[in-house]
Image (spheres, rainbow, N blue to C red):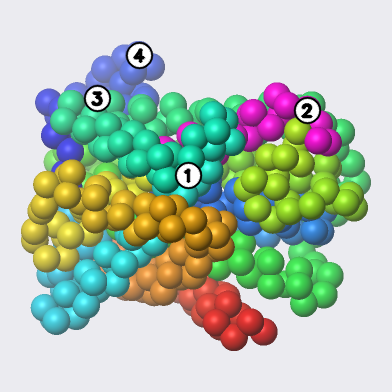
Amino acid sequence: MTAVQEPAKTVAEIRATRGMRSKLIFFGPAFVAAIAYVDPGNFATNFSAGAQYGYLLLWVIIGANLLAMLIQTLSAKLGMATGRNLPEMCQERFPKTVSRLMWVQAELVAIATDLAEVIGGAIALNLLFGIPLFTGGVITGIVAFALLALQNRGFRPFELAIAGLFGVILLGFLTTVFRIGIDGPDLAAGLIPRFEGTDSLLLATGILGATVMPHVIYLHSALTSGRIPAVTADDRRFLMRRQRADVLIGMGLAGVVNAAMLVISAALFFGSNIPDTDTLEGVHAGLARVLDQPAAFAFALALLASGFASSGVGTYAGQVVMQGFIQRRIPLLLRRLLTLTPALVVLGLGLDATRALVLSQVVLSFGIPFALVPLVLITRDRAVMKELVNHKITTAVASVAAALIIGLNGFLIWQTVTGA
């Protein structure tokens, strides 16, 4: 799916324009991608880590965020260098059968993505307003559809709306962090890589293994391809510098949100007898019990913003995937219904929403290699990337990161299936 583009200015025209607005035009794609790193699945994982192990796994969150910065930078660079997105490049470079199979798995990933995000939004509406989960799921789907409709007015309104919801998430947690007592030495100790037994290693694997979401690897390249026309090699290098800043700030703030979740949980829940802090409802109740109702409200509001924004971003990514892999588009409403239906079935049948959310993350894990490996292979190819080709060190680090993420996801899947 390609948003209606605003009247495009060249890089030279933008660089010649004075004022803050001309500088801010380069920012936006990474903030859209960053929503995937603060989606409802991250809420449960980070709060569970803090409640069980205090600040112990803070270093894992920071390391995971650095990996995310690297991967999303490569995706953004691919879009700028080629003017096409990752699914389109895969469709061009791989045999038709392979491309179709990649599309099928990407569609399953899109459904799993929407499952987690719609459930998160539904739970938030239930916590805030007592709305039944099924009705909350429908409302989340409608809001996501409205967000996507903003693209008819150009890429900027959609980006600003998502950035605004991201701001709600950020403020929701920062306001709570500033109200709690944080143990400085324990916080500093959490920056030192270490584990405490097998269970802490497994939880760290869950945090790292779910770091890179395949749908935003596909999407980020679409958000930067053709966004600002680059005429010369110097233009592309300039845009790349601006995109690095976009990723650094956008993904950096996502890291702040994830760290804040763990810090809040460690400060309030670690060593306590507060039950069910591994569920979203349990965290909400725990915040109200240990701190106060405003803290619980801030959590639920941040969860709601996360569910709304991530659901819209996930559906947008689904359109990019279909158009890129099989050169087809379907009406946006039908697209929304296809990915929304499984989530509504889960909510309508009264199944364990948190369990369904966790299982959706396992499905997402299967999609990681299909997005990550082609990304590394293509961005190291000078014939495709030209002056934006990866440095050999970048390719080496990205390859190690890809192997690490794929390995951890495989371990997470094995643990989930076998119950070991």
Q: Nearer the viewer, residue 117 or 371?
A: 117
Q: Nearer the viewer, residue 15 or 7?
A: 7
Can you give x and y, in whole percent of width and height, for residue 27 in the image? 37, 33
Q: Residue furthest top?
A: 19
Q: Which residue is mark 4?
A: 19
Q: Where 347 sits versus 130, above or below?
A: below
Q: Nearer the viewer, mark 1 or mark 3?
A: 1
In magenta, the rendered stretch is 289-310
Query: Would residue 29 be visible to someone looking at this image?
Result: no
Q: Residue at x 16, y 65 (%)?
A: 325
Do the residues under discs 4 and 2 have CB atoms within 8 angstroms? no
**Amino acid type of disc 2?**
Asp
Query: Mark 1 or mark 4, which has the lower sequence index?
Result: 4
**Amino acid type of disc 3?**
Ile
The CA distance from mark 4 to mark 2 is: 43 Å
Q: Which residue is mark 2?
A: 292
Q: Which residue is mark 1?
A: 133
Horizontal side, residue 347 vs residue 183: left or right: left
